[in-house]
Structures are given as C-alpha cells and as structure tokens.
Image: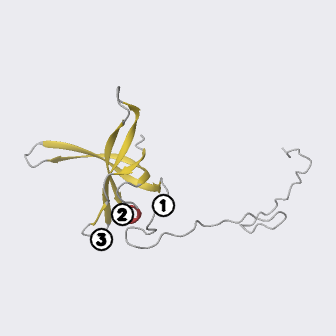
C-alpha cells in the first residue's frame, strides 16, 4: 500500500514548536494550498488549508526557518485520528505527517536572519568543476580508463 503526500503552499501562521515530556520536538502548522482551478465567475483560486505535523529535526528545521507567508514544499503521509470534542461528539482529524521539508521561495527580503536571529548564509556553496585533464579524487576507479571523444563518436 502507498500513503505519500507531496504539497507546496504557504504557511498560514508561524509554526508552533513544542517538546514532548521526553524532550522530542514537535511542530504543528497549517499551509494554504491553491486548487488547480478557479470557481466560475471569479478570478481568485480557492485554497485548501491543510494541517501538518513534523517531528524531531524536521520540526526544529521548520520552526527555525519558516514563518507565516513563507512558501514550503513538503513530503509526508496522511494520517487520521479520532477524538471526542468538548460536547462529546466523535470527530476525525486528518493531518499530514511531514517527513521532509524544502524551501520553495527565496530568502526573505530585508532582515537576513532566521526566526531565532541567526543570519542566513550570505552565499550559496560554490562548487568548482574539475579542470580538464585533472585527476578526480572522489574514489578509486580501479580499471576505468579515459576515453578520447574528440572524434565525435561515442564509444558505445
């Protein structure tokens, strides 16, 4: 069986970070996800507001770097739970249990800090391409040999 959810939307409010009694981080938040169609006679798309829960390092990451209005992409699974409300009526709640979260927009303008005041990195990591003819030191390639492709033909 398969239970996989992939969503991209904007946070409706700042994530709420709590700790369980055993010290495990849990973040709860909701995201607004636009529907793929517009209602007849309107120019605005409707949105669904989806409750999400993240645990441990994922919870810490989301609560630190995401805030109200930020775009987030996430992967997880759909989970339901039953409970009784204040009047004793039986209810069912559905929420996405987040496994992975990703930035889906650029860094916030102006203050270049996360929610705890720590500055974002000023630049992305730079990767250098190996120089032509240089040795690649990523591992032992054993019996592999360099193939000359200057004639335009592929060797296979």
Query: Could you say where residue 43 lies in the image, as x and y percent from the top left?
Result: 38, 33
Q: Is mark 2 on a helix, strand or loop?
A: helix
Q: What element carries label 1?
A: loop
Q: Quarter of the image holding residue 147?
A: bottom right
User: With respect to residue 8, does 133 lie above or below?
Assistant: below
Q: Mark 2 points at which residue?
A: 63
* Measured Cα–Cα span from mark 2 to mark 1: 15 Å
Check contact, mark 2 vs mark 1: CB within 8 A: no
- Please report the residue visible at 38 percent of the width from the left and 53 percent of the height from the top: 98
User: With respect to residue 100, does 89 lie above or below?
Assistant: above
- Please report the residue visible at 37 percent of the width from the left and 36 percent of the height from the top: 44
Query: Could you say where residue 150 lies in the image, as x and y percent from the top left?
Result: 90, 51
Q: Name the residue under label 3.
A: 23
Q: Which residue lies furthest to the right in this view?
A: 151
- Please report the residue visible at 24 percent of the width from the left and 69 percent of the height from the top: 21
Q: Which quarter shows the N terminus?
A: top left
Mark toward the start of the polypeptide (2 vs 1):
2
Mark toward the start of the polypeptide (3 vs 2):
3
Q: Residue 107 got which mark?
A: 1
Dot in front, 3 or 1 = 1
Mark toward the start of the polypeptide (3 vs 1):
3
Q: What element carries label 3?
A: loop
Q: Counting other residues with Cα less than 10 Å from the Cα at mark 2, is it few (<14), some (14-19), or many (20 or more)?
A: many
Q: Which residue lies furthest to the left in this view?
A: 87
């Amino acid at each position: 069986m398969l239970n996989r959810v992939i969503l991209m939307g904007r946070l409706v409010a700042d994530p709420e970070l709590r700790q369980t009694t055993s010290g495990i981080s849990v973040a709860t938040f909701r995201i607004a996800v636009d529907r793929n169609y517009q209602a007849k006679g309107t120019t605005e798309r409707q949105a669904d507001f989806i409750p999400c829960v993240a645990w441990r390092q994922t919870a810490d990451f989301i609560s630190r770097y995401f805030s109200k209005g930020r775009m987030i992409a996430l992967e997880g699974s759909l989970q339901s739970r039953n409970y009784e409300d204040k009047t004793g009526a039986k209810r069912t709640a559905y929420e996405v249990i987040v496994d992975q979260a990703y930035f889906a927009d650029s860094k916030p303008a102006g203050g270049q800090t996360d929610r705890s005041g720590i500055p974002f990195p000023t630049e992305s990591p730079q990767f250098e391409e190996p120089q032509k003819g240089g040795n690649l030191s990523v591992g032992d390639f054993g019996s592999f040999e360099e193939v000359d492709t200057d004639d335009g033909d592929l060797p296979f």
